Image (spheres, helix red, strand yellow):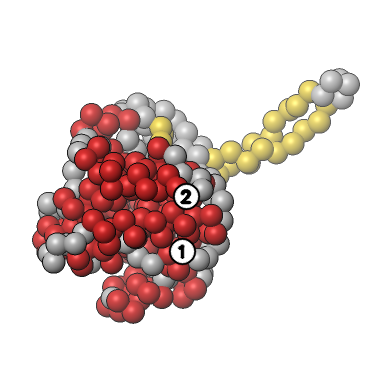
Amino acid sequence: MKRLEFNKSFGQFLKLASIELPSKNFYNYLKSSNEGLNQHYEECKSLYSLPNTDSKIIKICEKLVNYLKTNYEEEENNGDLKDHHCNLLSFWIYEQLNKKIKGTLPPIIPIYGGYQLILSDVLKDPKESQAIDCLRNVSVFAFDNWKDRKDLYDYCVDYDDIIKIAASSYEKCKEYEEYIKGKSRLYKQFDSLYTSTYNKENTKFYEKCKSYNPESVLPTLKCEQKFPEQAKAKGFSQDPVLLDSTPISVKKPDSTDTYGNVLLGVVVTSMTSGMLYKEDDFATVWDGIIIVQVT
């Protein structure tokens, strides 16, 4: 399993950037992979004795057990994400619980701990015992900014692919230029956001991640220089101005006229895929004329 594959039938509905990047591909696999889950129901049903448990909590458990039984050994030894899949898996599990319970850490702890107990019962084979620790200790998520921590880690896992894809065309270069810009805020708090446990386990990757600061990366993209013809065709100058302040007349109910300036970000593009999507901190228009930047 060099790279996890998700159900192809979902392809037309998935965000393009999601299926391009390793971490998003991994999460998509976990989300859409449902084959063989029922065989783990008996192993997970004990969770019904805990508060906040329903069929969704059981299904998350089934996905966790199924992944570790089916994919752990191959991914750990030969996978593209062999150094990261357990961290990504743990982030995904916690995120699903957070979405379901919609609370802070305390109500999540019993269920997360229940998952760990189930793994210790299920993975008894000597070859499987190491997989128990693949679900990281819940203390990793004992922070209000766990989502920012996850976003930072995902960005660093995806970095090599981001740079390769950005070099493939002018459109991709501009797309990921905006994506990388959106990560700037994370690097203002890098040392506090990077999970200390992951740093201790893989110091080399920590140093790499630190070097992926958008302030250092963005000047190296040089989209207009690398793709001058495409840039010209798309109507972008070397230093494009994406924002324009346009006065708009507004009529109030009392018939008095007021004028205000509405800040509009407008970019003309001729992309033809007919899809609009938002990925993290940027949005792209396909077969349209507007790109909206929301931060």
| Label 1 packing within 10 angstroms: few (<14), some (14-19), many (20+) | many
Q: Residue at x 82, y 24 (%)?
A: 252
The residues bearing labels 1 and 2 have C-alpha atoms spaced at a distance of: 20 Å
**Which of the 4 quarters of the picture holds residue 62?**
top left
Location of residue 275 in the rendering, given as x and y in whole percent from the top left corner: 36, 29
Label ID, residue 1: none
Location of residue 161 in the rendering, given as x and y in whole percent from the top left corner: 24, 56
Vertical comparison of 124 with 208: above or below: above
**Which of the 4 quarters of the picture holds residue 219?**
bottom left
The residue identified by callout 1 is 141
Residue 178 can be seen in this image: no
Residue in the foreground of this view, choosing between 148 and 132:
132
Depth check, mark 1 against mark 2: the one in front is 2
Q: Residue at x 63, y 41 (%)?
A: 263
Choose the circle earlier in sequence order: 1 or 2: 2
Residue 295 can be seen in this image: yes
Q: Residue at x 20, y 37 (%)?
A: 35
Vertical comparison of 187 with 150: above or below: below
Looking at the picture, which amino acid does disc 2 mark? Leu
Vertical comparison of 254 with 142: above or below: above
The residue identified by callout 2 is 50
Q: Secondary structure at mark 1?
A: helix
Q: Is 292 left or right of 264, judged from the image as shown?
A: left
